[in-house]
Amino acid sequence: MKKIFSFIIIILLGFYPKVSIAKSFGAKGFTLDNGMQVVVIPNTKVSAVSHMVWYKIGAVDEPLGKSGIAHFLEHLMFKGTTRYGKGEFSKTIAKSGGDDNAFTGYDYTAYFQNISRDKLELVMDMESDRMENLILDEKEVLTERDVILEERSARVDNKPSSVIAEQMRAALYRNHPYGTPLIGWRHEIAALTPEDAQNWYDKYYAPNNAVLVVSGDITEKELKPLAEKYYGKIKTKKTPQRIMVSEPTDNFAAINISLADEKVTRPEWSRYYIAPSLNTDEKGMTYPLVLLSYILAESDTGRLYQNLVVEQEIAVSVSGYYNDLQLGESFFGIYAIPSDKSNIEQIEKEIEKQIENIKQNGVTEDELKRAKNALIAETIYAREDLKTLAYLYGQMMATGVGMEYADNWEKNIEKVTAKQVQDAAMEVLQIDRSVTGYLTPKG
């Protein structure tokens, strides 16, 4: 996830008049008697809604030896309930002119539907039903386990870029579940049982462990009775308290990981630096890091793209990553693919040169202003995109930063100084707190 609105936001470059996120979004929140949190983001310009249910449970909560169970249950949630048969959930949504899906993260699991306003009650009825009435047939569970193993083969095991990224995460997060693949390790997926899935569902899928987010043509006054009708009747559960371990940031050492594979046609270089998230930041670095990532690597106007791709033509692409919305430590990532006239060694040398320049000399006031304007302009797009808003608020609530994050985001970005960006670079972009990946063709 990138910057404030993650990877699903389109970046608008250049200047755009400032907007207040709180006033633009108009989000309201309340809590049902059973503990379920609810967020509504009204938008009367459309006759549609985006409906999401976020569970505060993800891969980070998986017990040792059970990696992949969170993602496994996400798949199984579409296998039917006492009221709806196998596959009927998605078929009903499609017949109603909508679409639905789900995704698993390290800190959460979420289910969403995008549909016309008049079908909202149908969606709420079905989603609340599978919160408490899921049927886990043994044959279906084992069949779906095979499907996930095939998914892992296609998306990870047979994809060199995914293999090295998986190994880099494992090396970066030495003492944290973030180092375990979201999909799970192959041998542990293969050992998951129907009982494992049932236990996960029974333990964590509860209204007091969930957040309902509805964005679109509905008001708080209209949503509240519907939320109470469909979700308010579900009983609470005594869910285990989340135990978060911290990733040590001292006594680290630079780690290099190399992978040569015949499927690789062009070399790739990447580096991850351990970095704070909003939940772990003790030095006020998250907002400066958001701006640093944009100035350095996340934009076509950024230093790395301009220097390596445009001016020297030694790279065909450069990108960056930093996500401040996590329960635990995040990471600051840089990726580059050398051009035919270059190689990984030259790319690495030039990137390190640009990083050192920022650490020693900082960023210019003009760079900082342009980055702030571009990031703030994203709120214009987010305001009009129902899915983006539902995703943003769901992620905020699921990671515990609350709605105040959006309310204060623009103010916090605006007050970042060039010195703070430089200090963040000095603190985070240290080679002995990084993992570097070298992906090359074999032979």
Image (cartoon, rainbow, N blue to C red):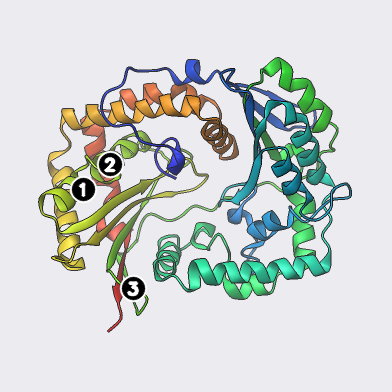
Residue 28, quarter of picture: top right
In this view, the residue in front, 94 or 249, is: 94
Circle 3: residue type: Val
Q: CA distance from mark 1 to mark 3?
A: 23 Å
Q: Are marks 2 and 1 in contact (CB under 8 Å)?
A: yes
Q: CA distance from mark 3 to mark 2?
A: 26 Å
Q: CA distance from mark 2 to mark 1?
A: 7 Å
Secondary element under disc 3, as helix, strand or loop, is loop
Residue 167 location, x and y as percent?
Answer: 43, 68
Name the residue that disc number 1 marks. Answer: 305
Residue 308 location, x and y as percent?
Answer: 16, 53
Q: Judge whether 197 appears above or below 24 on screen.
A: below
Name the residue that disc number 2 marks. Answer: 299
Circle 1: residue type: Tyr
Name the quarter where the C terminus is drawn: bottom left
Q: Residue at x 75, y 70 (%)?
A: 142
User: Crowding near pointer 2: few (<14 within 10 Å), some, many (20+)?
Assistant: many
Q: Residue at x 29, y 76 (%)?
A: 441
Q: Residue at x 63, y 66 (%)?
A: 64
Residue 342, quarter of picture: bottom left
Q: Residue at x 38, y 21 (%)?
A: 411
